[in-house]
Image: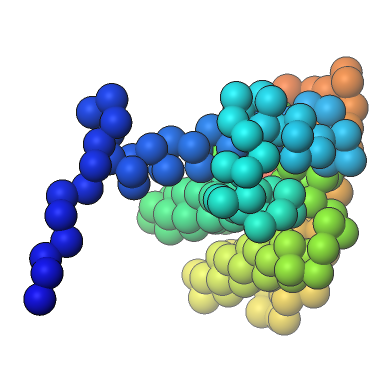
């Protein structure tokens, strides 16, 4: 049986490394375009021009414009999801419920909205793009409803809040948080992100009273 030969390298990089670089450049270019001029104004050719790559190279990596958007969104949202969950768990300890919720919100907001381009893509540009991305967006929201519900359930067990079903409250809160961040992204004269977190914290506190 013939053994495969060594992978050819160009400029000291393997084919896999060059492909990873192309993919990264295309995702970054997509983020730049979707997050600044908007999805509708960012055709594949324009993304490729920003990435300094050809449309052929684009379609070798992504089957469509939506696929690049989906790839970038999943990366950013999963990062925010993991970061926020980790922070929420780490913040439990003996802190008050308000402090625990605010810690999770602060980490979540900073991980998804510190880069305004990512925030615009996550909260504005992906809405209704296609059924697959929309299903992912809704699944991501459900994960956060579950997380908030878990924090509230822990507060019930600690005797901090009344014992009732908070699932609707958790869903309302996540919906309000997304709505506020959508407005924040779409406003030129936007408040500091820390002010958004503080407002969400006050809302979360009101929901449990």
Residue pictured at 55% horizontal, 50% vertical:
61
Residue 50 in the image: state x and y as whole percent: 66, 24
Is 94 situated above or below 1? above
- The furthest residue to the front: 2
Residue 124 in the image: state x and y as whole percent: 83, 44
Decide which of 179, 139 is in the foreground and name it. 139
The N terminus lies in quadrant: bottom left
Residue pictured at 57% horizontal, 51% vertical:
60
Report whether 84 appears left or right of 116: left
Residue 188 in the image: state x and y as whole percent: 88, 21
Residue pictured at 53% horizontal, 33% vertical:
25
Residue 81 found in image quarter:
bottom right
Residue 19 found in image quarter:
top left
Residue 154 in the image: state x and y as whole percent: 52, 70
Report whether 61 appears left or right of 39: left
Decide which of 83, 11 is in the foreground and name it. 11
């Amino acid at each position: 049986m013939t053994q495969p030969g060594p992978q050819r390298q160009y400029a000291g990089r393997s084919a896999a490394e060059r492909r990873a670089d192309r993919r990264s450049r295309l995702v970054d270019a997509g983020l730049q375009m979707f997050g600044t001029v908007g999805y509708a104004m960012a055709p594949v050719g324009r993304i490729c021009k920003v990435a300094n790559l050809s449309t052929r190279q684009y379609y070798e990596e992504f089957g469509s414009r939506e696929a690049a958007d989906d790839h970038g969104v999943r990366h950013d949202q999963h990062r925010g999801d993991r970061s926020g969950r980790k922070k929420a768990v780490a913040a439990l300890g003996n802190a008050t419920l308000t402090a625990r919720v605010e810690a999770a919100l602060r980490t979540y907001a900073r991980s998804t909205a510190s880069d305004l381009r990512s925030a615009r893509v996550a909260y504005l540009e992906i809405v209704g793009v296609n059924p697959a991305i929309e299903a992912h967006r809704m699944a991501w929201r459900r994960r956060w409803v579950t997380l908030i519900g878990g924090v509230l359930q822990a507060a019930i067990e600690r005797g901090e809040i009344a014992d009732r079903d908070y699932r609707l409250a958790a869903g309302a809160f996540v919906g309000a948080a997304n709505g506020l961040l959508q407005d924040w992204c779409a406003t030129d004269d936007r408040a500091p992100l820390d002010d958004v977190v503080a407002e969400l914290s006050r809302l979360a506190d009101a929901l449990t009273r």
